Image: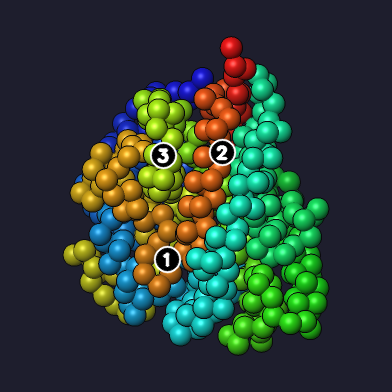
C-alpha cells in the first residue's frame, strides 16, 4: 500500500498560499514529520527566495531556497561562516560541541584532512566486498510474506555495521552507535530529561576516550579513531571537541545513508513506473543512487552566520544573523533541475544536487554513501522483484534531518 499524500498535500498547499508571506516559517518540525513542507518552499522560491522569518522556535533567521543562491552562500565562507553551529538551532552555551564541519579554514581544513583517507578510492575498493557480503546476509535473513520494519532491519543495521568498521568499534556493541546518533539528533524529551541525554553523550565520550587511549598508544592504523589520535591537527583536541567530532562522524556515517536507503524504497513505491523500469534494467542502479539522494535530501538544511553586514539576493543581511541554506528546497528548484518533484532513475545529470553540500564543506563520505546505496540495491534486485510498503512511514519531527523512524514493508512470496 503506497502512502496517500494527496489530501494532506492539498491542505498544506492551501495553507502555504493563504499565510502572509512574512509569517511563513519553514523550520516547523511538524511539517517535516508530516511531509507537508513542500508548498511552503515552493512559494518562497517563487515569491521570496531570500526570506526573513522574524519569529520562530529558533529565533529570527534568513531562508535561502534556490539552488544557485545556496551554492553562492556555500562558496563564500569569508562572509558566511560555519563557526559555532551548522544547524538553525543555536548550541547550548553550557554543552557546546565543536566539530570541524562547524569551523572555517584553516582549522576546518586541517581536521578534515586527517580523516579523509578513510574514504580514499583504494579504501573504498577494500570496503566494497565487505558491504556486499553484509548486505546479502541482512537481506537473506528478512522474512517473506510477513510485515517487518525496513528501517530497523535493513537501513539501520547495514549502516551501523559499516560505521563500526570505520571506527574499528566492538562489533557486538555496534547498536550503541545508533543510540548515540539518535540522542545527538533527536528530541528525546518524551523519554528522558536533557540532563539524562547529556549524560548518555558523556558516556559516549568516555567510551570513545578509552578507544582513543588504546589507539594513541599504538602504531597508526586505518580507522577513524586512530586517525584522530595520531593526526597532527586533531591529537590535541580538548574533550568536548573530540566528542563533537565523534558525534559528527557517527551521524554523518549513519543517519544520512540509512535515511537514503529508506527513502529510496519509498520513492520507488511512489513512482511504480520507475520501479518497473529498474526491474527491467538493473544497471540503472548507478544513476538511481544519486537520484535517491537528491529526492530524499537526508540533511534538510545547513546554517551559516553572517560575519559582516552584507547584501544578498536584494536583501540586507546584518552581521551575526542566521542564514539557513535549505538543501531540501534547492533540490526541488525547477530553475536548476528539470521536473524536480518527480523521481526519475535515469536522469541525464543525476549528481546535480545539493544533498552533500558544496565547496569546502562538501560531505567527505559522499562516495562511500553512494557505494553503500548502489550495493544494497544491486543485492535487493538479485533477490526480490518487489518490496511493498504496507503503511505510511513514520518520520522524525525535525527540520534538520529528514529521517524515518519506521517503515513497515512486506516482501511478497514468489508464486
Place of residue 21 in the rendered image (x, y in percent of width and height, measured from the top left): 27, 47
Place of residue 168 in the rendered image (x, y in percent of width and height, measured from the top left): 72, 64
Q: Which of marks 1 and 3 is nearer the N terminus?
A: 3
> Mark 1 sits on what residue?
362
Q: Nearer the viewer, residue 399 or 392?
A: 392
Q: Is residue 259 visible?
A: no
Place of residue 209 in the rendered image (x, y in percent of width and height, measured from the top left): 77, 74
Q: Can residue 75 be seen in this view?
A: yes
> Mark 2 sits on what residue?
379
What residue lies at 36% left-to-right and 38% top-to-bottom? 345
Q: Nearer the viewer, residue 34 or 231?
A: 231
Q: Which of marks 1 and 2 is nearer the N terminus?
A: 1
Give the label, 1 or 2, closer to the camera.
Answer: 2
Q: Distance between the residues labelled 1 and 3?
A: 27 Å
Q: Distance between the residues labelled 1 and 2?
A: 28 Å
**Would residue 346 appear left or right of 34 to someone viewing this image?**
left
**Would residue 259 appear left or right of 13 to someone viewing this image?**
right
> Mark 3 sits on what residue?
283
> Could you say whether the residue bearing mark 3 is in a helix, strand or loop?
helix
What residue lies at 58% left-to-right and 30% top-to-bottom? 383
Q: Nearer the viewer, residue 180 or 345?
A: 345
Q: How is the image coloured?
A: rainbow
Q: How crowded is mark 3: few (under 14 residues within 10 Å), some or many (20 or more)?
A: few
Q: How far apart are marks 3 and 2 (CA)?
A: 12 Å
Amino acid at each position: 500500500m503506497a502512502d496517500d499524500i494527496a489530501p494532506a498535500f492539498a491542505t498544506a498547499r492551501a495553507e502555504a498560499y493563504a499565510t502572509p508571506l512574512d509569517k511563513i516559517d519553514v523550520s516547523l518540525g511538524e511539517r517535516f514529520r508530516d511531509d507537508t513542507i513542500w508548498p511552503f518552499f515552493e512559494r518562497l522560491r517563487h515569491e521570496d527566495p531570500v526570506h526573513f522569518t522574524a519569529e520562530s522556535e529558533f529565533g529570527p533567521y534568513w531562508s535561502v531556497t534556490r539552488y544557485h543562491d545556496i551554492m553562492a552562500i556555500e562558496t563564500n565562507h569569508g562572509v558566511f561562516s560555519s563557526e559555532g553551529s551548522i544547524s538553525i538551532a543555536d548550541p547550548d552555551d553550557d554543552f557546546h560541541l565543536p566539530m570541524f564541519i562547524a569551523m572555517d579554514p584553516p582549522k576546518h581544513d586541517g581536521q578534515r584532512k586527517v580523516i579523509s583517507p578513510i574514504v580514499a578510492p583504494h579504501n573504498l575498493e577494500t570496503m566494497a566486498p565487505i558491504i556486499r557480503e553484509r548486505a546479502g546476509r541482512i537481506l537473506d535473513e528478512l522474512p517473506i510474506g510477513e510485515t517487518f520494519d525496513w528501517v530497523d532491519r535493513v537501513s539501520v543495521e547495514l549502516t551501523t555495521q559499516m560505521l563500526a568498521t570505520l571506527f574499528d568499534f566492538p562489533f557486538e556493541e555496534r547498536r550503541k552507535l545508533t543510540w548515540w546518533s539518535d540522542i545527538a539528533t533527536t528530541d528525546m524529551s518524551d523519554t528522558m530529561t536533557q540532563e539524562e541525554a547529556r549524560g548518555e553523550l558523556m558516556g559516549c565520550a568516555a567510551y570513545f576516550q578509552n578507544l582513543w587511549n588504546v589507539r594513541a598508544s599504538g602504531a597508526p592504523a586505518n580507522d577513524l579513531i586512530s586517525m584522530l589520535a595520531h593526526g597532527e591537527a586533531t591529537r590535541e583536541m580538548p574533550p568536548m571537541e573530540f566528542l563533537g567530532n565523534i558525534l559528527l562522524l557517527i551521524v554523518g556515517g549513519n543517519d544520512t545513508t540509512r535515511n537514503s536507503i529508506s527513502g529510496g524504497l519509498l520513492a520507488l513505491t511512489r513512482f511504480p513506473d520507475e520501479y518497473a523500469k529498474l526491474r527491467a534494467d538493473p544497471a540503472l542502479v548507478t544513476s538511481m543512487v544519486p537520484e535517491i539522494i537528491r529526492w530524499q535530501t537526508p540533511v534538510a538544511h545547513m546554517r551559516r552566520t553572517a560575519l559582516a553586514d552584507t547584501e544578498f539576493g536584494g536583501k540586507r543581511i546584518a552581521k551575526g544573523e542566521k542564514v539557513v541554506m535549505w538543501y531540501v528546497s534547492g533540490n526541488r528548484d525547477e530553475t536548476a533541475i528539470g521536473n524536480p518533484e518527480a523521481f526519475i532513475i535515469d536522469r541525464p545529470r543525476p549528481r546535480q544536487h545539493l544533498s552533500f553540500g558544496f565547496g569546502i564543506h562538501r560531505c567527505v563520505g559522499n562516495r562511500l554513501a553512494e557505494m553503500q546505496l548502489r550495493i544494497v540495491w544491486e543485492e535487493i534486485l538479485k533477490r526480490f522483484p518487489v518490496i511493498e510498503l504496507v503503511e505510511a512511514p513514520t518520520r522524525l519531527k525535525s527540520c534538520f534531518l529528514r529521517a524515518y523512524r519506521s517503515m513497515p514493508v512486506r516482501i511478497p512470496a514468489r508464486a
